[in-house]
Image: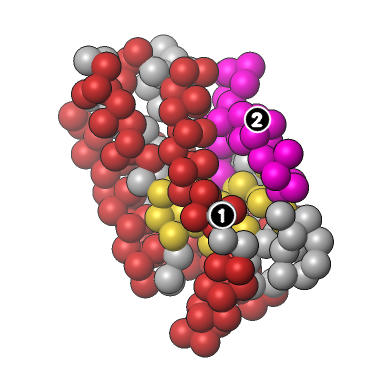
């Protein structure tokens, strides 16, 4: 796959603990790296344990702009939710990262949610941030990958609970959970991979709407 710039496509993933692969030997990003390598897509992971959207904004130039990716996948939410980041701050930080990226190198932008929680209180907390991701994706003309919907469907299909797919700390998926996230994100990426020109056309449309 060749980018509009005439080079191999670069996919950069920026997120917190889950994208960083906290406490697992093989994360969903590792799975994607192996899967996409043969398709000419370089996966760059600039995610870190417990980082929030504030870190995403603060380190934008080092972690995102430096690499000038063709596709930018942002997966924040869980760390923000459990570190008391306000929803309004979360949304504004996402918007700021997206706007900066479009001004600097205009990538195709995707936003991804994360898994579900068995505890209703925890689920209520993260749902606030998942709704915010949906709002930002709509307002900023980004692609939303609703991982939590696919995760919930998987649980129903196999009669499981989220505890079967997470570590002792339910904020972090285990390796089986990461495989589910990888499958979901790959499905979201497939429409771009199968139609490389969409990267360029979406970028042009987004720039015109900004």
Q: Secondary structure at mark 1?
A: loop
Residue at image point 44% right, 38% down: 184
Give above or below for 4 relative to 85.
Answer: below
Quadrant in the picture for residue 140: bottom left
Give above or below for 104 relative to 110.
Answer: below
Residue 132: assigned label: none
Spatial CA span between label 2 and label 1 = 21 Å
How many marks do you count on the picture?
Answer: 2
Left or right of residue 29, residue 147 in this image: left
In the current view of this chain or complex, which residue is farthest to the bottom?
A: 208
Quadrant where the N terminus lies?
Answer: bottom right
Is residue 65 inside the magenta stretch?
no
Is residue 41 inside the magenta stretch?
yes
Nearer-the-camera pick, 103 or 198: 198
Considering only order in the chain, which callout, 1 or 2, is on the residue closer to the N terminus?
2
Left or right of residue 117, residue 196 in this image: right
Nearer-the-camera pick, 156 or 166: 156
Residue at image point 41% right, 18% down: 166
Residue 52 place in picture, x, y as percent: 52, 46
Q: Residue 161: in sight, yes or no?
A: no
Instruction: Tell me the residue that label 1 is attached to.
Output: 194
Residue 175 place in picture, x, y as percent: 52, 18
Q: Are marks 2 and 1 in contact (CB under 8 Å)?
A: no
Range of residues picked out in magenta:
15-44
Left or right of residue 107, residue 169 in this image: left
Instruction: Tell me the residue that label 2 is attached to.
Output: 30
Residue 25 place in picture, x, y as percent: 63, 17
Residue 104 place in picture, x, y as percent: 69, 74
Quadrant in the picture for residue 78: top left
* Other residues around mark 2 within 10 Å, as few (<14) / some (14–19) / many (≥20): some
Residue at image point 52% right, 41% down: 186
Q: Secondary structure at mark 2?
A: helix
């Amino acid at each position: 796959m060749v980018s509009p710039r005439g080079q191999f496509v670069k996919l950069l993933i920026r997120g917190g603990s889950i994208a960083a692969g906290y406490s697992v030997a093989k994360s969903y990003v590792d799975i994607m790296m192996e899967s996409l390598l043969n398709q000419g897509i370089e996966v760059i992971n600039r995610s870190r344990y417990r980082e929030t959207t504030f870190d995403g904004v603060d380190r934008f130039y080092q972690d995102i702009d430096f690499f000038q990716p063709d596709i930018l996948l942002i997966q924040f939410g869980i760390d923000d939710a459990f570190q008391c980041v306000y929803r309004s701050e979360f949304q504004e930080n996402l918007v700021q990262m997206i706007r900066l990226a479009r001004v600097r190198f205009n990538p195709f932008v995707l936003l991804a949610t994360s898994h579900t929680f068995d505890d209703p209180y925890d689920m209520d907390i993260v749902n606030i941030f998942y709704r915010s991701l949906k709002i930002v994706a709509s307002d900023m003309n980004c692609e939303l990958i609703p991982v939590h919907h696919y995760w919930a469907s998987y649980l129903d299909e196999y009669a499981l609970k989220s505890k079967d797919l997470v570590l002792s700390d339910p904020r972090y998926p285990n390796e089986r959970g990461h495989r589910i996230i990888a499958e979901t994100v790959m499905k979201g990426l497939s429409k771009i991979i199968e139609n490389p020109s969409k990267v360029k056309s979406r970028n042009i449309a987004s720039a015109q709407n900004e």
